[in-house]
Image (cartoon, rainbow, N blue to C red):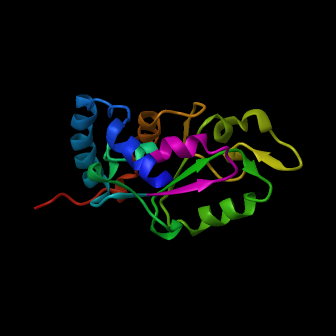
Amino acid sequence: MPARIILRQLFKTGIISEPPPAPDPTLAVNAHALNEEILRIFGRAVGVRHVDAGSCNACELEIHAMNGPHYNIEGAGVKFVASPRHADVLLVTGPVSAHLATALRRTFEATPDPKWVVAVGDCAATGGPFGESYACRGRVANVIPVDVVVPGCPPEPKRILAGILTAVRTAPAHRQAPASP
């Protein structure tokens, strides 16, 4: 009986949700240019491995938003990979807790060279309110070398993507894909 009441109310009310965000035309133009640039540099999509080193998950929400259809980063040539062995870029969030310092170091060592590390968020950049203590190693740079820092609490998806691009643009000349015939 309660299911009947709920269904009746659903059919009467309809679907209520907020409208999707308007498309950002500059982002669409940048996605095409980004794809060409990534193909020029790598000759394939750039692989990103995300590592949560002890964050509050605010940065993860923004990373998930960046990975959604609105930003279409896979269409632009940036894809998340399941293993550090397939990654070009490590995307690290949070202050590094003492329990995760070894795992973060091993993930860094498992990523093939050349590799780049992007520290995402204020906690990854500075240690945030946690700082350094018996339980926390502080910023990511205290454990592994960091190439790019994306500040913010949490940073917007566009800023995270800009951080990945900054790392990719520092690719050494030997990493550049050969020119197509």
- Residue at 37% over, 35% down: 16
| Identity of the residue furthest to the left in this view | 181
**Who's the residue at 74% across and 63% down the image?**
102
Question: How many numbered discs, if any?
Answer: 0
Nearer to the camera, 50 or 174: 50
User: On the rendered structure, is 110 left or right of 136?
Assistant: left
Residue 25: % across, % down: 22, 30
Visible residue check, residue 171: yes
x and y, in percent, of residue 169 in the image: 38, 44
Would you say 50 lies left or right of 165 here? right
Q: Residue at x 51, y 68 (%)?
A: 83
Query: Is residue 169 something one can see in this rendering?
Result: no
Q: Does the magenta-highlighted stretch encompass residue 56?
A: yes
* Residue 123 picture location, percent across and down: 68, 38
Q: Nearer the viewer, residue 140 or 80?
A: 80
Task: Assess whether residue 113 is covered by the magenta stretch.
Answer: no
**Where's residue 43, x and y in %?**
27, 60
Q: Quadrant of residue 166?
A: top left
| Image vertical order of residue 108 relative to residue 125, above or below | below
Chain part drawn in magenta: 48-64
Task: In this rendered view, identify the residue nearer to me: 102 or 41.
Answer: 102
Quarter of the image for the C terminus: give it.
Answer: bottom left
